[in-house]
Image (spheres, helix red, strand yellow):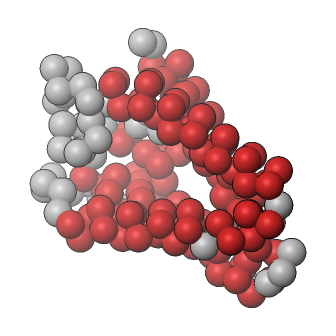
Amino acid sequence: MCESRLRLHGIVSLIFVLISFIIGVNAIAYDSVILSAVNAFSILAFFYVVPVTYCAKCRTREQCNHYIFGKISVMLSKFRDEPYRPADWLPVVLIMLAIIVLPQYWLAKHVYLLVSYWVLFAVAGIEVLTFICPNCLNQKCALCRNRAMSM
């Protein structure tokens, strides 16, 4: 698949995830501005933690299929040619869990928001699993599904 189409899928998937996260922040804001702000801060932290901890070890981050994470990683961190450790992926998983789990109570109060949240999140996941991971060149990434072309 051509590089520009992969980047398009990467950007679209991140936009869908971001919109679903914003829907979660909005759902929480109906009842709690403070918890909504905590969730919003977690989303901002996500866009810092992922590129600095996880993407910093990717050899192909300058040609990242997610595009935005690669650009942020190059700006904020130096390349580290090391294998991934739990200290690299654990913060990413914990922040993702916080962002996903926190709004569920409030999303469930508004079914249209709950459905929108999960449809967008699922479409983003399908985009990543169908187009991004199969064409990934980062053999160190546990999600890389393209071992034959890995660097």
Residue at far top of view: 1
For the question of whether residue 140 can be seen, the reply is yes
Residue found at x 47% / y 49%: 69
Q: Which of the 4 image quarters holds residue 84?
A: bottom left
Looking at the rendered structure, the number of numbered marks drawn on it comes to 0
104 left or right of 146? right
> Against 35, is 121 above or below?
above
**Which corner quadrant of the image does residue 13 belong to?**
top right
Looking at this view, name the residue that lies furthest to the bottom: 34
Residue 61 image point, x, y percent: 35, 42
- Residue at 66% x, 58% y: name it: 21
Q: Quadrant of residue 15?
A: top right
* Left or right of residue 120: residue 127: left
Q: Does any portion of residue 40 appear in the rendered image?
A: no
Residue 22 appears left or right of 41 = right
Which x, y percent locates residue 18? 65, 52
The residue positioned farthest toward the right in the image shown? 30
Q: Residue drawn at (48%, 63%), measured in percent from left and top? A: 96
Query: Nearest the camera: 83 or 37?
Result: 37
User: Whole-percent x and y of residue 48?
Assistant: 49, 65
Q: Give the quadrant of the N terminus.
A: top left
Position of the C terminus by quadrant: top left
**Residue 129: x and y, percent?**
42, 32
- Seen in the picture, residue 117 relative to 8 is either above or below; the reply is below
Q: Nearer the viewer, residue 84 or 127?
A: 127
In the image, what residue occupies the spot 58% across and 26% down?
8
